[in-house]
Image (cartoon, helix red, strand yellow):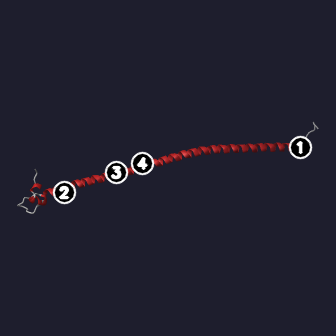
């Protein structure tokens, strides 16, 4: 039996089983490639998540800075409005006070009168009120 040639059918069966084994091995290699691809995708996903977190933190910081700048400008505007109002009020009060003093100084009822000019006046009845000494 050792030297007898194999029949054609047995020859083909050997090739088919060798081909099937080869295809099985290639299939397993494809599965290993898919596992490697899954691992590589997981690594890329972790990297993308890391960069997305960094971008989110940077955006949150930028938003905080924008809010602080808006608050700063709002406070500055309020301060400038109040300073302008105070300046206007001081100017009006100064003008009114000056006008009021001028009115008081030259009005007849505030000019001191003697007893001969006005008998019922307070300064005529109490001369010590009008004295400077």
Circle 3 residue: 79
Cα separation, mark 1 vs mark 2, equals: 132 Å
Q: Residues within 10 Å of mark 2 (few under 14, many from 20)?
A: few
Q: Quadrant of the N terminus?
A: top right
Residue placed under numbered mark 2 in the picture: 100
Depth check: give the residue in front, 117 or 71: 117
Q: Going 34% across and 51% down the picture, which residue do you hit?
A: 79
Q: Which residue is mark 4?
A: 69
Position above or below: 126 against 18: below
**What SS does tag 1 mark?**
helix
Q: Which residue is mark 1?
A: 10
| Sequence order check, earlier mark of 1 and 4 | 1
SS of the residue under disc 3: helix
Q: Position of residue 6 (x, y in %)?
A: 91, 41
Give the CA distance from mark 1 to mark 4: 87 Å
Query: Which tag is nearer the camera, tag 1 or tag 2?
Result: 2
């Amino acid at each position: 039996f050792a030297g007898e040639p194999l029949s054609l059918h047995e020859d083909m069966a050997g090739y088919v089983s060798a081909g099937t084994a080869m295809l099985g091995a290639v299939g397993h290699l494809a599965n290993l490639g898919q596992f490697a691809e899954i691992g590589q995708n997981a690594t890329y996903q972790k990297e993308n998540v890391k960069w997305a977190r960094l971008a989110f933190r940077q955006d949150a910081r930028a938003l905080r800075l924008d809010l602080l700048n808006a608050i700063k400008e709002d406070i500055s505007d309020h301060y400038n409005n109040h300073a302008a109002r105070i300046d206007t009020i001081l100017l009006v009060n100064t003008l009114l006070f000056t006008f009021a003093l001028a009115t008081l100084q030259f009005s007849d009822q505030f000019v001191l009168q003697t007893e001969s000019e006005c008998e019922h006046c307070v300064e005529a009845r109490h001369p010590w009120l009008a004295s400077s000494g």
